[in-house]
Image (spheres, rainbow, N blue to C red):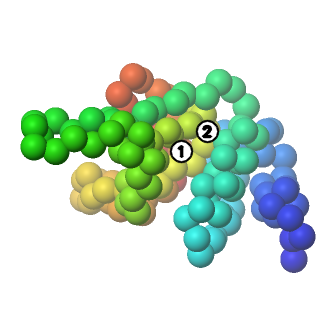
Amino acid sequence: MARSKEELISTIFPSLHVNGNSSDYIISRAILSTKNEHVDELNENLIDRFCGDEKIYYSFDEAQDDRNNFYPMEFLNSLNVSGLPPHVLRLKIGCPIILLRNLDPSDGLCNGTRLICRKFEPNLIDAEIV
């Protein structure tokens, strides 16, 4: 049993910096947690272990066509809703991600599908189904 998060990560993902781009390496490993806050902490730690430059995506932080309500940007950015990505999404080539929507179930793109990041565009993540 791991005594710390560092030990847990090193045990489950040994040599991540070397094997991070291997689909077989990634799909044969997982860390499960009962709390989203623990998952967020682990993800932050793991993303730093992948080689290469990171791409940062930001959520929209304003409500459109809603003149009756004003939502402060800080409030919108602080929301952490289950089933939606965080306000700041940090990714690197080779890192695993999980699809949160049913985009095309007949093609395997449904909620819970595991993918690996392969390329980044300004408003698009190119990922391989694993």
Q: Position of residue 11 (x, y in %)?
A: 85, 62
Q: Amino acid at mark 1?
A: Ile
Q: Which residue lies at the image location 41% right of the left edge and 52% below the top edge?
A: 79
Marks 1 & 2, CB-CB < 8 Å contact: yes
Q: Which residue lies at the image location 84% right of the left edge and 46% below the top edge?
A: 15
Q: Which mark is residue 2?
A: none
Q: Which residue is mark 2?
A: 94
Mark 1 and mark 2: span between their CA atoms? Answer: 6 Å
Q: Is residue 109 left or right of residue 120?
A: left
> Secondary structure beneath disc 1?
strand
Q: Nearest the camera: 19 or 98?
A: 98
Q: Which residue is mark 1?
A: 116
Total numbered circles:
2
Q: Which residue lies at the image location 45% right of the left edge and 48% below the top edge?
A: 78
Q: Nearest the camera: 84 or 72?
A: 72
Q: Nearest the camera: 63 or 28?
A: 63
Q: Quadrant of residue 40?
A: bottom right
Do we see residue 11 in this rendering?
no
Q: Position of residue 22 (x, y in %)?
A: 67, 44
Q: Position of residue 52 (x, y in %)?
A: 69, 26
Q: Amino acid at mark 2?
A: Gly
Q: Nearest the camera: 114 or 123?
A: 123
